[in-house]
Each structure stands twice: as structure tokens, then as C-alpha cells.
Amino acid sequence: MVKQPFLNNMAINLSTIFTEVPFLARFGKVRDYGFSTVECQFPYDYSVAEIRQELERHRLSLVLINLPAGKWQAGERGLAVDPARIPEFKESVRLGIRYATALKVPRIHCMAGVVAETADLTAAKQVYIENLRYVAKEAATCGLTILIEPINRFDMPGYFLNDIQQAKAILDEVNWPNVRLQFDFYHIERIYGNALAVFQQYASLCDHVQIADVPGRHEPGTGEMDYQAIFDYLSSHYNGYIGLEYTPLGKSEASFKWL
């Protein structure tokens, strides 16, 4: 399905694939199956030295991490829209940038956060914009790109950034060149359907792409999306990395058959 050298742009998400083994053992698995690039959601349970050792040992590049997103097990999905968490958000920025610079990670996803049904969305948006300007300024001194990503509310109820037009408006208002769009075909398909058409409209804003099939969020070929058409278009119109942020339907090793 996927052509070389396009395959070289694929980044294994270590948070969702090879979860049959402990996190630090996943790097070797990636190399065993011929990949050279990885991404992960939250590396912060492990030291910079531990992760650097695995990257160097297996000759891998880490191309994306998320900022710390609060108490994940308690349902938090980011700190950037919460006016009561601004000091904590700024601390998360310092930690995220420390990891990114030490591990040579070029881009960081800043999750917006969940808002209550009774929340003042205008106020939340303003806090989000100011926080994005803050992290953009801090990241720019290190040559890092900050990403924002619309996430569907079926999977993440109450998530603030859930519409791509909303994301574009926020990017326009933030107005920092190193704040860009992360486009997850799975989330956009869940929100709108016909994710490829949406990507074609907003491709100029995108700095990173992620994929999974609908429904189920498993590997391409397990659902209803036409990934052959998506890859045909991306191979001609997109030069960045493609994060494989799917949950394998079976064993991780077997999930690469679609390639």
C-alpha cells in the first residue's frame, strides 16, 4: 500500500504500538521492524538519559512529544485552557522544552484541555491563546515548533479544541510562525467524515500528520477509511512525518501488514 521512500516518513507512536513490552523495550522493537523514526505522547516517566540511550542504541529519531497534560488518569487532557492552572502550565512548558531540546525533538504538541459544560468558552479561548503565545516564545528560542490538534469529542468528551476551523482561527490569533497544526486523520474523520478533503483544505497549516482507521482507531485497512487514496495524496503533497498513532487490532507486529 505504501511506497518507498514514503515509508521512511512513518513514525511509530511508542505510546500505542508495541505496548506488549515495557516502554524502554519498544525502541528496539521499532528498529527490528525497519523503522527509524518514533513519536510518543508523554515521555516524562523516564529520564532524558534513559530515553537518549535507547534512541542512540537503536539509531532512532524522536520527532514528536506532548507537553505534560495534567492528571491523565483523573481525566485531565491538557492545562492550556484553565485559568487556574497557568503557573502549572508554564512549569509544564519548561519540562517539555527540556526534554525536547535534550532529545533533539523538533516539535511539541500542546494539548488544550477539557472544559466543563458550564465553562466560559470565551474566557477559556483567551487563556489558551495567551498560553500558546507564551509557549511559542519559549519554544522559538530553541528552534522548536508547537502544535495544536483538533480532537473529536466522541473519544475525548469536553475537549476544548474540537473543530478545525476553530483551530485555524486560534492559529491566526496567536500569530506565531512556530505554532502549527497537527492533523490526525482519525479525529478529523470522526468529526467531519471525508478527512482527506479536509486535509486538502488545511494542508498549508500542517506540520505533522497522524493516522488510524475509523471506527476502532486501529491500523489502516481495519475500518472504512480509504487510506490508499490518502497515502497517494500525501506522497505527492506532504513532506512531513506521519505518526502511526493507532491501537493495533491484534499483535503490534501483525499490524504492519497494511504497509
Image: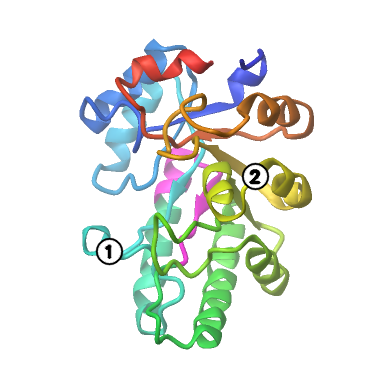
Furthest residue toward front: 224
On the image, numbered disc 1 is attached to which residue?
A: 75
Q: Secondary structure at mark 1?
A: loop
Q: Taking 91 as reference, is 121 left or right?
A: right
Residue type highlighted by circle 2: Ala
Residue type highlighted by circle 1: Gly
The answer to whether one can see residue 141 in this image is: no
Neighbours of disc 1 within 10 Å: few (<14), some (14-19), many (20+): few
Cα distance in 3D space between marks 2 and 1: 27 Å
Region of the chain picked out in magenta, as a range: 99-112
Which residue appears at 45% of the width and 37% of the height?
Answer: 245
Residue 138 sits in quarter: bottom right
The answer to whether one can see residue 3 in this image is: yes
Find out whether residue 61 is within the magenta segment: no
Q: Position of residue 196 (x, y in %)?
A: 69, 41
Q: Position of residue 130 (x, y in %)?
A: 56, 78
Q: Position of residue 142 (x, y in %)?
A: 57, 53
Residue 74 sits in quarter: bottom left
Total numbered labels placed on residues in the image = 2
Compared with 148, 115 (above or below) is: below
Which residue appears at 58% of the width and 42% of the height?
Answer: 185
Which residue appears at 34% of the width and 24% of the height?
Answer: 27
On the image, numbered disc 2 is attached to which residue?
A: 195
Q: Position of residue 1 (x, y in %)?
A: 61, 15
